[in-house]
Image (spheres, rainbow, N blue to C red):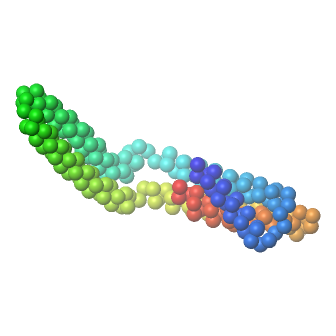
Amino acid sequence: MALALGIVIALTCVVSVVLVLRIPFSIEILAGAMAVISFAFATGILFLGKGKSIIKSKNDKDINESFSAEIDLQLKIKHLKANLRKRSKQLRMKFKEQTKIIKDKKLCQTLKTELKNEKRTLVTQTRLEIYEIKKEIKIESNKNKFLSEIFDKVFKFGIYRAMTISVLYMLTGLVLAVTLPSIPIMGATILIGVPITIIVMLSIVLPI
């Protein structure tokens, strides 16, 4: 998903820049675009592969310790929701038992109103508690450095690898633009597309 999105955005940006610069549209632009797509695909695979390998290097104990606070808070939310369902069911059963004994319709209606009010109060209280817990989860997530450490490592790796590969692509583009007068537009498209693709991959694909 992230890789496909990055390729689409990078290609869109390259085409936009080519149109702004008023480079004549021809089959050479399509060839250059294909080279840009291959570059985007290669860098995207490198980023995703590196991120996956870093996560795999972390054992379950490290991951559980890093997210223990968030997991405990999520369990609290789960228990609150389960308790809400249980209490709601108990209120319904209580109402049914009372209405079996009481034949007065007016009194039954009063009990029904009381049941609705009690359930509404229970739901409101539970939602407030869940809201407070979610605020705690957000605070804990902001303090958690696990994902930021992985992002930092992949970002540094991405810059190094992207620059290495981009040098090869841009040299190729430069050679095509200078030494082959018949297809200069292809070389120009590659020269424009590679830097744009690096920016897109590092700023959009990597965070996703």
Residue 62 shown left or right of residue 173 in the figure: left
Of residue 182 and residue 95, the one placed in the foreground of this image is 95
Q: Point out residue 98 in the picture as x, y percentages from the top left corner.
A: 9, 31
Q: Quick check: can you spot residue 73?
A: yes
Residue 179 shown left or right of residue 68 in the figure: right
Q: Point out residue 66 in the picture as x, y percentages from the top left corner.
A: 37, 52
Of residue 126 and residue 5, the one placed in the foreground of this image is 126
Q: Point out residue 39 in the picture as x, y percentages from the top left corner.
A: 71, 56
Of residue 117 and residue 103, the one placed in the foreground of this image is 103
Marker count (numbered): 0
Residue 102 shown left or right of residue 127 in the figure: left
Vertical placement of residue 51 versus 112, above or below: below
Q: Residue at x 65, y 63 (%)?
A: 198
Residue 52 shown left or right of residue 75 in the figure: right
Of residue 42 and residue 89, the one placed in the foreground of this image is 89
Q: Residue furthest top?
A: 100
Q: Residue at x 29, y 50 (%)?
A: 73
Q: Residue at x 52, y 51 (%)?
A: 54
Vertical placement of residue 97 versus 116, above or below: above
Q: Residue at x 58, y 57 (%)?
A: 205
Q: Quick check: can you spot residue 140?
A: no
Residue 11 placement: quadrant: bottom right
Q: Residue furthest bottom?
A: 21
